[in-house]
Structure formats: structure tokens, C-alpha cells
Image (cartoon, grey):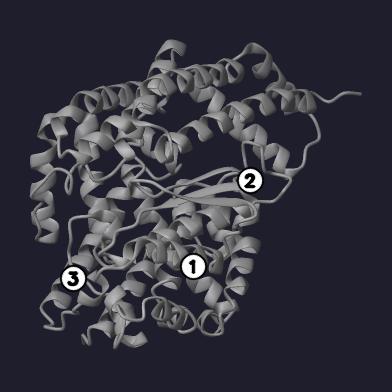
Amino acid sequence: MDRKYDELMTYVEKMQALGMAQGLFGWDLETEAPREAAALTARMMGSLSSQYFDILTSPQVGELLCQAAEEELDEAQKAILRELAKERDRLCRIPAEEYREYAELTAGATQIWARAKENNDFASFAPVLTRIAEMSARIAGYSKKEGQSAYDAMLWQYEEGFGRDVLDPFFALLREHIVPLLRAVMESGRAVDAGPLHRSFDIDKQRQFNRYLAEYVGFDFGRGVMGESEHPFTIGLHNRDVRITTHYYENLLESAMFSTIHEAGHAVYEMNVDDALTLTPVAGGASCGMHESQSRLMENMIGRSPAFWEPLYPKLQELFADELAGVSAGEFVRMINRVSPSLIRTEADELTYCLHVLIRYEIEKDLIDGSLQVKELPQVWNDKYEEYLGVRPLTDTEGVLQDIHWSQGSIGYFPSYALGNAFAAQIYRAMDREIDVESCLRRGEISRITEWLKEKVHRFGRVKPAQELLREATGEEFNPRYYIDYLTEKFTGLYGLK
């Protein structure tokens, strides 16, 4: 007898195809598409989004979801129904015409943002950002749970269970420990001169090394592509087509390297999802925070460690023999771990990074509850940077326009970066109890690390909710103290603090 679950999967395949087509359009807009393509391509992306909406909210899919739930299903199939039902419930609350309008708006807004950033012209981006903020709040309002604010509903979309009731004390804890540690570092008198990393580094040679670096940390070029974009990102179409980008600066060697390691961390997660799950609604990461934990773990806890560079630095120094002449491996590692409060989140040092996220979190809360207007963003942004980091942007390009996220409608996403750091520290500690991570890195055996992560995290995709996955991988509930301890131990040691 035909199962209703199998019938339902025919609709799911159509939805996945539409999502993949949108992903390809999005990739193209950010990498190779001509500037003038944005408006018309956005219309087509809106059409695809509308078709996806129509399928998932159709009575047929609703009926099949109910019928399939009565059948005997395995864990993955039950998870697929769970995710479909959750997304269907959210979309059914949103008027179809507003859903399409929002999809077209955000698809076209990224090009407007990119031009505004290039020209230091916030005024040209402000009208579309105003529309995005207004529509985001309205759409979140349709699906928010009883007692939730619109911003809480946005936060839950990226990290279920982590609303302001959890994030406010989480960020307060980070602020309580990071700010005095940062002050102690800055007052230590042990500033690190990173001048050698700001020499002129040939872009083609950088591309050569970054390709090697991506492959070294586990990116499979048989199943992936590496491109270039204004803002580095990862897109996973399925586990055999995962695409990453980086961005090269002639006078900032480390920028592309750590963007590459970061995005490769995302990509390895996507590539390691079990074959049975790919091309289904549970193929991606367990949550945005869990996804960020894999990129931040790879970028910082692995990629900035002395052990990681022990087998790698000779190759980098050989490629840039003149530029890095006289720079020892130890000096290089100190440079890439230096603490220096700066303006750009993606270039931020590891200690101050979460303060950049905190600023965005505080701004988003006020923007969505209406106490802050879009036109006020540059001033508020600059004031908060001066308050928290002691630096003040001179332009909107290096200030409020630096991130692509709001143009994509990803309001509520930023806290996932901070949660990802905390998840990563907890996962790293659990992993280090089972395998000697530092020894593996010194021997260049990074595959042992990625295999552990695949077994404990990656292969499950979204079958297990993030908090359950974290608990099973580490043996305990979410505990941000591991992250605090990690930062304290690392920077107390690096800067010789008591």
C-alpha cells in the first residue's frame, strides 16, 4: 500500500528544487552577476519563493502531513515532518502577497546595500532598510507565540529557545567578563606589532594559498566551489554542492585566510550531512548557532592555535618569502591572535568579537520595537562603538553599512555568532577529552578532528534540535562558562596577565 509519507515527499522534492534555484540565483547575484541584473532577478526569485509558499501552504500538503504522522516512521522521517509542520504553520499565518513582496524586496536589497557600502552612502540604503525592518516586524508578528515580541519571534527563527529572556543574561555575562579582560590586555603594555601582515601580498598567490588552506581543513573541491564576494558566505545546495566565498585585500594577508577557514567550517558541516538527509528539510545545520559553532571553532580555536600553524606556516612563508622574511612562526601566531579593538566585525580579534555582536543585538531590539528609527542608525552605531570598543567609525562604510545581513532580512541572526562561539568552546572541550586536539594539529591530522565532528554533530543535519545535539555531543546542557574560561585562559596567557 502506498504510504502518505512517500506521497508527501513528491511535494517536498518540488520545494527543494525551488529552494535550490533560489540559492543559485543568490550565489550568482553575490559573485558573478552584473550589477544591472539585481532588479529583474529579484522578481524571478520572488516568483520562486511564491511557488514554494503555495506548495507548503496548500491543503494537500496539510492533509498529507497529518496522515503521514500516523504512519510508522524512523527518526529522520519524523524530523522531516516536524520541520515541515513548523514551517507550514509559520507560512500559513503570512498573507501570500506579503510573503512574495518580502522575498523580492530582500533579493534586490543586497545590490542596493553593496552600492551604498561602496559609495559610503547610507542615505541610498535607508529607504529599503526601513521597508525591510517594517516588513520583518510585521511578518514576525503573524507567527509569534503568545507572550512573544516580534523580535523574539525573529530570534527564534534562527535559534529556537533563545529569546531575549536567555540572550539578555547571556550577553550580560559576556560583557561582565570580556570588558575587564579587554581593559587588562590593553593596559598590559604588550601591544603586538602586526605590520608584516600589512605589506603588499600578491592576490594571485593569496588565492593559491587559500585554496590549499580550504582543502587542508576539509573542504572537498570535488563537491564544492570557492568564489569571491564582497561579504564572504557559504551556501549548501546539497552535500555534493557546497559553495564558499572569500574576499582578498592586498595589504591584509590574514583577512582572506580566516574568512576561508571560517566558511570552510560551515562547508564541511554541510558536506558531512548524512546522504539520507540531503535534499530534505533536515539537511542543513541544527540551528544557525550550531552552524556558527563549526565555523568559529575551525576559524579560532583550531585556526589561530600555534599547533595548527606548525605544519602550515613553512608553506605560507615559502610562498611569501620576501614579505614574511624574518617573521618566525611564533611571531606570526602572536600577530594573528593580537587584541586590537577595531571597527569591522569580520576582521575583529577573538576577544572583542562578541562586543561587535552585542552592539548589533542592542540596535536590533530597539529598531524592531520602534524606539529607534533607521535614520538614527549611523549615530547610534557610532556611539556604541565608542562606548564598547573605544573606536569610532569615520564613515558609514566602516560603520553601519559593513554587514550584508539586514539587506537580506536577517534581523535576529547576529546573536547566533555569539552563541556559536559559546557552543564551540563547549564542543571543543568535549572533543579534547576524547582526542588530543593539539597533537593532531601538530601532526597535520586535522581529519581526526573533522571525523569527530562528523560523528557527533555534522551527520545529523537538523534531525536533532540544537540543544539536544549539544547535550548529546558534550554530555551537558548549554554552558557559556566554557567560552568565558577559554577566552580568559587564552588571553591571560598570551598577554602575561595574572
In front: mark 1 or mark 2?
A: 1
Whole-percent x and y of residue 169? 28, 53
Q: Quadrant of residue 403?
A: top left
Q: Nearer the viewer, residue 333 or 283?
A: 333
Judge from the rendering whether residue 365 lies leftward or rightward of residue 45; answer left or right: left
Q: Which residue is mark 2?
A: 463
- In terms of sequence position, does the residue under pointer 1 or pointer 2 come before the other? 1
Residue appearing at x 17%, y 77% in the figure: 185
Q: Which residue is mark 1?
A: 213
Whole-percent x and y of residue 223? 63, 52
Secondary element at tag 2: loop
> How many residues crowd around disc 2 within 10 Å: few (fewer than 14), some, or many (20 or more)?
many
Q: Nearer the viewer, residue 243 or 162?
A: 243
Looking at the image, do the residues carrying marks 1 and 3 touch, with CB atoms under 8 Å apart?
Answer: no
Q: CA distance from mark 1 to mark 2?
A: 30 Å
Whole-percent x and y of residue 327? 30, 85
- In terms of sequence position, does the residue under pointer 1 or pointer 3 come before the other? 3
> How many residues crowd around disc 3 within 10 Å: few (fewer than 14), some, or many (20 or more)?
some
In front: mark 1 or mark 3?
A: 1
Secondary element at tag 1: helix
Residue appearing at x 59%, y 64% in the figure: 453
